[in-house]
């Protein structure tokens, strides 16, 4: 009688069986924790022993992985005095440190891109930007407290989000190109108002020099050359070049323009006032409406999924409700103190993970770096990051590539299989560019409803497929 061969389970089969076991063990361990330890991961008995193994250069490298998103938008808004660099850096660092006690995986803290890009393009005031952060925080807190976030997240049209991302990305790209296309700049001192007056020629181009079109082209080549090399921090390199040029320009013009001396220490002199009713109205219609679906889909829903994929051994490392609550509390408290509205994002987590971040120790490192820089160099950077001193070509290149990355995410739609999605995306993006992003959101939502309800087009919507987005 012939013997029946015995099948040997494959390695993949063992892996599939082990993953549910790991999950069940993590769930049982989590369920046994006291309430306070469930909320704050640093209070858990095993946290200190586990954290020691992550005190490495790899973790430090990973902590800096998302500065390419943080620096361009914060710098662009600081130079035009739409935000105060010192408070934004300090409170973003404090926010990051607080979050490191709340999450056990590296959750990024990055500017809300739609709000930032619209503020850059439309020149909204510091109070209007603060109002947008307070409003979106209130909405997210309500969604988290009632747990409606899990329901709302399922019904946000993916194509609508893509359209907003594309429209905002292209708007950011256009602003960057205008800034990088350097014109001759003249700085004068007004003895009456005691202010530095910056005048840019509308006809004469600045081809040569430290702040010129040639430098813009060289920086663009640098960024393009390392665009797909995550381990090369091109944004930091470009920013540091700008700081060096600004220091030289500051020293050369200090006496002529009656500039104050560069000093060490923090700077909290430009805190925002409480926004007016008009500020809240403008912020809601022009900035909050376009930002909200992006935040719900990418900063909350997609982040939860990606965190689970990257850290399967953890028990729900970043639940939608927990993420939503953290953004709400952080923005409500810190935006009133001068911080640019911040959120988390799947793309930011992917970047930090790619650079080596594996725990909340990376958040502690990054938060500490931001705090130290704000406290030691806050005053210096406030003086250097001013229009006419900090090179416009650097601002332009940083903003260009922030816009490029956001636009690339926005066109991630299968045009052959999802023609309805393409219509919604194009209507949203075109209206955002032609009018404003708030109107683009409304037009895109109306288009989606017509396709989904009236026309009953089955291709008008498809579910989230990618988590490599930007907030």
Image (spheres, helix red, strand yellow):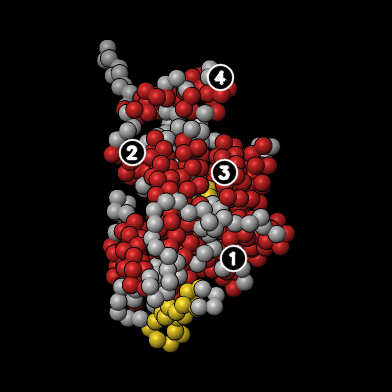
Q: In the rendered view, does 12 fall on the left or right side of 268?
A: left
Label 3 to label 4: alpha-carbon separation: 24 Å
Locate the N terminus by quadrant.
top left
Which residue occupies the foreground of this view, 418 or 266? 266
On the image, which quarter does residue 234 sit in?
bottom left
* N-term mark: 3 or 4: 4
**Image height of 106 relative to 421, above or below:** above
| SS at badge 4 | loop
Q: Quick one: label 4, few (<14), some, or many (20+) residues within 10 Å?
A: few
* Viewer-nearest of discs 3 and 2: 3
Residue carrying label 2: 59
Q: Is residue 391 visible?
A: no
* Viewer-nearest of discs 2 and 1: 1
Label 3 to label 2: alpha-carbon separation: 24 Å
Image spot of residue 186 (x, y percent): 42, 80
Image spot of residue 424 (x, y percent): 60, 62
Which residue occupies the foreground of this view, 169 or 216? 216
Label 1 to label 3: alpha-carbon separation: 22 Å
Residue carrying label 4: 34
Q: Are marks 1 and 4 in contact (CB under 8 Å)?
A: no
Question: Image point 40% across, 86% down: which residue?
Answer: 204
Q: In the rendered view, does 204 fall on the left or right side of 444?
A: left
Residue carrying label 1: 124
Image spot of residue 88 (x, y percent): 50, 52
* N-term mark: 2 or 1: 2
On the image, which quarter does residue 367 sit in?
top left
Residue carrying label 3: 330
Which residue occupies the foreground of this view, 29 or 212? 212
Label 2 to label 1: alpha-carbon separation: 37 Å
Q: Are marks 2 and 1 in contact (CB under 8 Å)?
A: no
């Amino acid at each position: 009688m012939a013997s029946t061969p015995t099948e040997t389970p494959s390695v993949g089969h063992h892996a599939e069986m082990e993953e549910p076991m790991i999950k069940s063990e993590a769930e049982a361990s989590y369920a046994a924790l006291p309430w306070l330890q469930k909320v704050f991961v640093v209070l858990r008995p095993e946290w200190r022993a586990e954290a020691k193994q992550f005190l490495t250069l790899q973790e430090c490298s990973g902590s800096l992985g998302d500065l390419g998103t943080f620096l361009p938008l914060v710098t662009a808004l600081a130079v035009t005095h739409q935000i105060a660099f010192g408070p934004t850096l300090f409170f973003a660092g404090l926010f990051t440190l607080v979050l490191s006690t709340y999450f056990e995986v590296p959750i990024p803290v990055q500017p809300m891109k739609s709000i930032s890009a619209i503020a850059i393009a439309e020149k909204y005031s510091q109070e209007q930007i603060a109002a947008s952060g307070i409003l979106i925080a209130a909405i997210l807190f309500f969604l988290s407290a009632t747990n409606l976030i899990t329901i709302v997240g399922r019904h946000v049209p993916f194509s609508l989000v893509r359209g907003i991302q594309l429209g905002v990305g292209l708007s950011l790209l256009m602003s960057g190109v205008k800034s990088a296309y350097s014109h001759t700049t003249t700085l004068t001192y007004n003895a009456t108002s005691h202010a530095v007056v910056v005048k840019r020629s509308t006809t004469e181009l600045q081809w040569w020099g430290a702040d010129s079109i040639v430098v813009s082209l060289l920086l663009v080549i640098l960024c393009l050359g390392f665009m797909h090399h995550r381990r090369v921090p091109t944004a930091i390199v470009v920013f540091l070049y700008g700081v060096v040029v600004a220091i030289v320009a500051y020293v050369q013009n200090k006496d002529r323009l009656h500039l104050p001396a560069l000093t060490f220490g923090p700077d909290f002199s430009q805190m925002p006032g409480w926004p007016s009713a008009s500020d809240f109205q403008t912020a809601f219609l022009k900035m909050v409406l376009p930002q909200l679906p992006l935040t719900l889909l990418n900063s909350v829903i997609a982040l939860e999924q990606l965190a689970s994929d990257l850290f399967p051994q953890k028990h729900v490392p970043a639940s939608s409700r927990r993420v939503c609550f953290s953004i709400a509390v952080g923005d409500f408290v810190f935006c009133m103190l001068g911080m640019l509205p911040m959120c988390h994002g799947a793309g930011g987590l992917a970047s930090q993970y790619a650079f080596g971040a594996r725990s909340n120790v990376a958040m502690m490192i990054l938060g500490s770096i931001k705090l130290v820089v704000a406290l030691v160099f806050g005053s210096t950077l406030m003086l250097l990051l001013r229009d006419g001193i900090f090179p416009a070509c650097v601002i332009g290149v940083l903003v260009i590539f922030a816009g490029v990355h956001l636009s690339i995410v926005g066109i991630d739609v299968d045009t052959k299989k999802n023609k309805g999605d393409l219509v919604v995306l194009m209507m949203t993006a075109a209206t955002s560019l032609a009018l404003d992003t708030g109107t683009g959101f409304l037009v895109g939502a109306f288009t989606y409803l017509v396709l989904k309800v009236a026309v009953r087009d089955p291709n008008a919507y498809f579910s989230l497929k990618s988590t490599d987005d930007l907030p």
